[in-house]
Image (cartoon, rainbow, N blue to C red):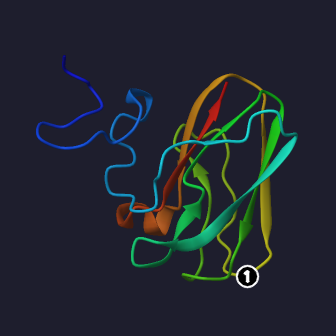
Amino acid sequence: MFDPGQEAGGESEGPAEFDGWFDNVDNYDGVVDRTGEEEITVQVGSQANGGGFGFGPAAVAVSPGTTVVWEWTGEGGSHDVQADDGSFASEMVGDAGHTFSHTFDETGTTKYYCMPHKTMGMKGAVVVE
């Protein structure tokens, strides 16, 4: 049977809901289950894609009402966090310890990226279930 998340002769790149979003992201290792937590932290500038150009973890599952706090590591230069659907955007920052947060109330998948490093694979996703 054909799996839409699988390329011919290749391995699955993740759930179909990501639709190839993580194809060039070398630190995507499945969805990390963080459901049931009120607040979680995702690193901005984690080691990925040839340097400090990743989100750690790249994909995370949370419960409705969870606040995701992105915390800058200071690696990889200046980064931002922008929702692919335009629902949130941080400022461009390079300082370690800087944070940006967003509370996810609705179920569904939100893809996000760092604008200057998107083509390098600096992308992430939050799955609210």
Residue at point 84% right, 39% down?
37
Instruction: Looking at this view, name the residue that lies furthest to the right.
Output: 38
Q: Position of residue 35 (x, y in %)?
A: 75, 34
Q: Position of residue 5 (x, y in %)?
A: 30, 31
Q: Amino acid at mark 1?
A: Asp
Residue 30 drawn above or below residue 44? above
Decide which of 90, 65 is in the foreground and name it. 65
Lateral position of residue 65 relative to residue 85, left or right = right
The N terminus lies in quadrant:
top left
Lateral position of residue 12 relative to residue 97, left or right = left
Helix, strand or loop at label 1? It is loop
Residue 51 drawn above or below residue 12? below
Q: Position of residue 109 (x, y in %)?
A: 57, 31
The C terminus lies in quadrant:
top right
Residue position marked by numbered label 1 in the rendering: 95
Instruction: Looking at this view, name the residue that lies furthest to the left.
Output: 9
Residue at point 60% right, 78% down?
78
Q: Position of residue 12 (x, y in %)?
A: 30, 39
Among the 4 quarters of the image, the one containing residue 38: top right
